[in-house]
Image: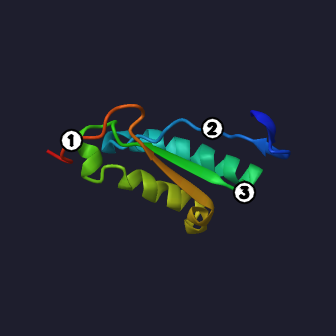
């Protein structure tokens, strides 16, 4: 696990692979959430940064396809997790859609 200092404060970073929005990835997400729950209990983070790429997944992203993944996170880590979470929505370098969902 990467460790270092930020402005004199010790920092440890736990990076996880991404959840998959597709319904067919439920098994993958379940295994990942179980591992994440274990790490969450072991390390007891002070802060969670949730990053979601809005340019990935095409029109399904605009249709709420990521909601099952968010519900899974809430179920695995508990609703209070969101109180210490920063949510970052990114286009990962791609220009935003010109007119929203098509």
Q: Tag 2 or tag 1, which sits nearer the N-term?
A: 2
| Marks 3 and 1, how far apart at CA | 37 Å
Q: Which mark is residue 46?
A: 3
Viewer-nearest residue: 37 or 51: 51
Q: Quadrant of the N terminus?
A: top right
Q: Position of residue 87 (x, y in %)?
A: 51, 53
The correct choice, above or below, for 100 with respect to 92 in the image is: below
Q: Nearer the viewer, mark 3 or mark 1?
A: 1
Q: Can you give x and y, in whole percent of width and height, for residue 21 in the image?
A: 36, 44
Quadrant in which residue 24 is drawn: top left
88 relative position to 60: left or right: right
Residue 102 figure quarter: top left
Residue 83 at what x, y percent from top left?
60, 66
Left or right relative to 21: residue 86? right
Tag nearer the camera, 1 or 2:
1
Q: Which mark is residue 98?
A: 1
Q: Does residue 38 lie above or below 2 as drawn? A: below
Q: What residue is shown with label 2?
A: 15
Crowdedness near tag 1: few (<14), some (14–19) or many (≥20) residues, C-alpha within 10 Å: few
Residue depicted at 44% across the width and 55% down the height: 70
Q: Left or right? Give the position of 9 relative to 14.
A: right
> How packed is label 3: few (under 14 Cα within 10 Å), some, or many (20 or more)?
few
């Amino acid at each position: 696990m990467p460790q270092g200092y930020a402005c004199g404060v010790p920092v440890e970073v736990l990076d996880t692979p991404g959840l998959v929005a597709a319904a067919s990835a439920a098994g993958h997400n379940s295994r990942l959430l179980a591992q994440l729950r274990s790490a969450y209990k072991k390390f007891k983070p002070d802060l969670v940064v949730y990053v979601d790429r809005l340019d990935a997944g095409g029109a399904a992203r605009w249709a709420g396809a990521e909601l099952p993944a968010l519900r899974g996170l809430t179920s695995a880590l508990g609703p209070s997790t969101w109180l210490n979470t920063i949510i970052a929505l990114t286009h990962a370098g791609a220009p935003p859609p010109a007119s929203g969902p098509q």
